Image: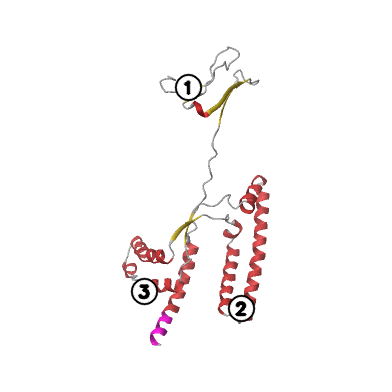
């Protein structure tokens, strides 16, 4: 049977000292991969221990890739304007929710693909769960970004600059506190995983990279998107009316 299957038996000495028989086998097809085979005495069994050594190549770690939408060449006003002048009649005329969703995607997706094309990147840093899973901290960060935008729009306004500094400092303090709480909770929950979390999030930027897509999704993102376009539409329309009348 061994020769019929083109296999080779590597153990050549008895493996059961009591009977002197060889009843423990190591069968391989590619014997070149086995560098050594030996039988070691075993005190807790009447069968000796059969050991086969082989040299294995360490699999090279493949860098994780995530899919994102590039905003490098994005002009928000152009995006809003194209969405504003797009033909949404198919969406309004559809009665079935599935047809309405399909019609909405037929208008939305090509516009987004033109202004924010998808691309794959290799993340350099691990995600920070004390930020991504903290709704309160993310709200504070959005307030900071809004304050920063106001400060840049009104560089001479000292109050706007002061509001930005307050928001920025509050976010920094909250991030430090959230990070400390995260590792304290990790230590209390399972000390065995504490060093794993430290290596993953603090020491090695390559370890534990998330393979999930970072493309925006979820109801919260949809609500934010809806609020943004609901507010920006009238302003773009007003700007167009002003240009036409000028």
* Residue furthest top as drawn: 19
**Does 225 appear in magenta?**
no
Q: Main secondary structure of the magenta part?
A: helix
The relative height of residue 210 versus residue 116 in the rendered view (above or below) is above
In this rendering, position of residue 189 left or right of residue 68? right
Badge nearest the viewer, 2 or 1 = 1
Q: Which residues are magenta?
A: 237-245
| In-front residue for pair 151/181 | 151
Residue at label 3? 85
Estimate how packed mark 3 is, as few (under 14), some (14 to 19) or many (20 or more) residues with alpha carbons within 10 Å: few
Sequence-first tag of 1 and 3 = 1
Which image quadrant for residue 169? bottom right
Image point 51% across, 29% down: which residue?
33
Sequence-first tag of 2 and 1 = 1
Where does residue 171 sit, x and y in percent of width and height? 63, 66
Residue at label 1? 8
Residue at label 2? 160
Where does residue 36 sit, x and y in percent of width and height? 57, 25
Distance in Å between CA atoms under marks 2 and 1: 80 Å
């Amino acid at each position: 049977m061994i020769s019929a299957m083109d296999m080779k038996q590597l153990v050549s000495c008895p493996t059961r000292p009591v009977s002197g028989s060889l009843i423990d086998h190591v069968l391989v097809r590619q014997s070149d991969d086995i560098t050594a085979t030996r039988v070691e005495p075993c005190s807790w069994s009447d069968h000796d221990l059969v050991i086969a050594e082989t040299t294995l190549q360490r699999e090279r770690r493949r860098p994780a890739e995530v899919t994102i939408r590039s905003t490098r060449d994005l002009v928000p006003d152009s995006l809003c304007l194209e969405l504003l002048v797009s033909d949404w009649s198919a969406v309004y005329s559809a009665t079935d929710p599935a047809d309405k969703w399909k019609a909405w995607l037929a208008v939305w997706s090509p516009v987004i693909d033109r202004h924010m094309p998808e691309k794959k990147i290799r993340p350099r840093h691990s995600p920070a769960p004390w930020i991504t899973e903290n709704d309160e901290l993310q709200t504070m960060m959005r307030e900071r970004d809004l304050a920063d935008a106001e400060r840049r729009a009104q560089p001479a306004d000292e109050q706007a600059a002061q509001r930005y500094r307050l928001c920025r400092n509050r976010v920094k303090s909250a991030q430090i506190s959230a990070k400390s709480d995260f590792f304290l909770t990790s230590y209390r929950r399972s000390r065995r995983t504490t060093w794993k979390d430290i290596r993953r999030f603090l020491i090695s930027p390559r370890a534990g990279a998330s393979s999930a897509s970072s493309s925006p999704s979820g109801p919260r993102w949809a609500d934010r998107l809806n609020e943004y376009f609901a507010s920006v539409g009238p302003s773009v329309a007003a700007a167009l009316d002003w240009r036409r009348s000028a």
